[in-house]
C-alpha cells in the first residue's frame, strides 16, 4: 500500500514537471555569435597579458615564461616616471571632472528646462568630438595662456595633461550624476528647506548625499578614462612629464619590450579594479543591476 502511494506521488510529480523546450537553431547561432564577438573584443587583451610574462628581449618574440618584464619596471626610472605622471594627472583630472561634472549633473536634474537640452547638446559635442581636434585646439590655447597671458602654471606639463584629460571626463561625470538624480524625488530637499535649513546645508546633507554613489562612480570612471588619453597627452605634454601612453608610442620605434606589456597589464588590472569599485559602490547604495548599468552609462 505504501509503495503504491509512493509511486502515485512520484508519477504525479513527474507529470507536473515542465519539460525544457529544445533550443532552436537561432538561439544556438546567436550564442555562438556572441562568443565570437567576445573573442574578437578580448583576444588582443589576452595576448598582451600573456606576453607580459615573456622573458625574451622583444615582445613579439616568445622566449619563455617569467617575471622579468615586471622586475624591469623597478630597474628603469623612465618607466617609473611615465607611470607616475599618468597616475598623478589621472587623479587630478578625475578630481576636476568630478567637481565640475557633479555640479552640472545636479543642476540638470534639479533645475529642468529648455536650457538642459542645450547643455546636454554641448556635453554630447564634447563627447563625440575627435580627440585630435581637442589636442590641436588645446596646444595653442595652453601656449597662449602660459606665454601671452602670463599664467605660468599652464607651462607645467602636469597642469596641461590634467586639464586636457578632464574635458571628456567632465561630460561623463555629468551624465552619471544626472542619471542618478533624475529619478529621485526632491521631497527631501524641499522638506529640508521647509525646516529652515540653509541652502548649503541642504546641498551638503541631502542633495550631495543622494548623489554620492554616482559621484564616486564618476570619479573612478574619470580616473580610468584619463589614464589612456593618448592623443591629447601627445600634443600637450612638455619635456620631463611624459605620460605612459606617450612613452609607449615612443618605444614602438625601437621595438616593444616585455616590460611595456607588464605595465599595460598592471594598468588593465587597475582599470578593472576601478570598475569593480564603481559597481560595488552602486550596489551598496541599493541599485539593481539594471540601475547600475544605467548609471554607469549615464542613461
Image (tube, rainbow, N blue to C red):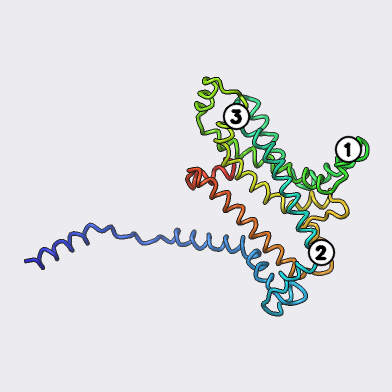
Q: Residue at x 72, y 77 (%)?
A: 55
Residue under pointer 3: 203
Instruction: For the C terminus, give its image quadrant.
Output: top right
Specify few, some or many for label 2: CA neighbours under 10 Å numbering under 14, 14-19, or 20 or more.
Answer: few
Mark with earlier residue (1, 3)? 1
Q: Residue at x 55, y 47 (%)?
A: 281
Q: Secondary structure at mark 1?
A: loop
Mark with earlier residue (3, 2)? 2
Using the image as rendered, state which of residue 138 and residue 38 is in the foreground: 138
Image position, residue 261 (x, y; %):
71, 66
Residue under pointer 2: 77
Q: Which mark is residue 151?
A: 1
Mark with earlier residue (1, 2)? 2
Q: CA distance from mark 3 to mark 2?
A: 45 Å
Specify few, some or many for label 1: CA neighbours under 10 Å numbering under 14, 14-19, or 20 or more.
Answer: few
Q: Which mark is residue 233?
A: none
Q: Residue at x 52, y 21 (%)?
A: 195
Q: Secondary structure at mark 3?
A: helix
Along the horizontal axis of the image, is 155 left or right of 37? right
Specify few, some or many for label 3: CA neighbours under 10 Å numbering under 14, 14-19, or 20 or more.
Answer: some
Amino acid at each position: 500500500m505504501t509503495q503504491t502511494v509512493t509511486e502515485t506521488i512520484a508519477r504525479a510529480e513527474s507529470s507536473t514537471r515542465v519539460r525544457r523546450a529544445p533550443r532552436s537553431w537561432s538561439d544556438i547561432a546567436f550564442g555562438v555569435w556572441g562568443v565570437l564577438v567576445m573573442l574578437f573584443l578580448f583576444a588582443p587583451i589576452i595576448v598582451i597579458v600573456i606576453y607580459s610574462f615573456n622573458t625574451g628581449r622583444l615582445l613579439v618574440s616568445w622566449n619563455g615564461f617569467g617575471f622579468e618584464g615586471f622586475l624591469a619596471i623597478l630597474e628603469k626610472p623612465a618607466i617609473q616616471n611615465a607611470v607616475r605622471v599618468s597616475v598623478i594627472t589621472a587623479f587630478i583630472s578625475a578630481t576636476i571632472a568630478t567637481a565640475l561634472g557633479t555640479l552640472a549633473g545636479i543642476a540638470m536634474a534639479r533645475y529642468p528646462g529648455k536650457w538642459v537640452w542645450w547643455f546636454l547638446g554641448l556635453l554630447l559635442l564634447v563627447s563625440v568630438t575627435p580627440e585630435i581636434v581637442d589636442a590641436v585646439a588645446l596646444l595653442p590655447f595652453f601656449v597662449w595662456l602660459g606665454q601671452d597671458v602670463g599664467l605660468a602654471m599652464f607651462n607645467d606639463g602636469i597642469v596641461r595633461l590634467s586639464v586636457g584629460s578632464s574635458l571628456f571626463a567632465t561630460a561623463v561625470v555629468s551624465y552619471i550624476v544626472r542619471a542618478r538624480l533624475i529619478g529621485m524625488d526632491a521631497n527631501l530637499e524641499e522638506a529640508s528647506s521647509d525646516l529652515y535649513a540653509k541652502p548649503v546645508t541642504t546641498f551638503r546633507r541631502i542633495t550631495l548625499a543622494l548623489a554620492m554613489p554616482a559621484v564616486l562612480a564618476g570619479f573612478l570612471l574619470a580616473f580610468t578614462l584619463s589614464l589612456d588619453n593618448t592623443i591629447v597627452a601627445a600634443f600637450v605634454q612638455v619635456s620631463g612629464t611624459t605620460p605612459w601612453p606617450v612613452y609607449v608610442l615612443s618605444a614602438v620605434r625601437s621595438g616593444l619590450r616585455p616590460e611595456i606589456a607588464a605595465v599595460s597589464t598592471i594598468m588593465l588590472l587597475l582599470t578593472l579594479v576601478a570598475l569593480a569599485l564603481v559597481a560595488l559602490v552602486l550596489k551598496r547604495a541599493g541599485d539593481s543591476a539594471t540601475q547600475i548599468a544605467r548609471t554607469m552609462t549615464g542613461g
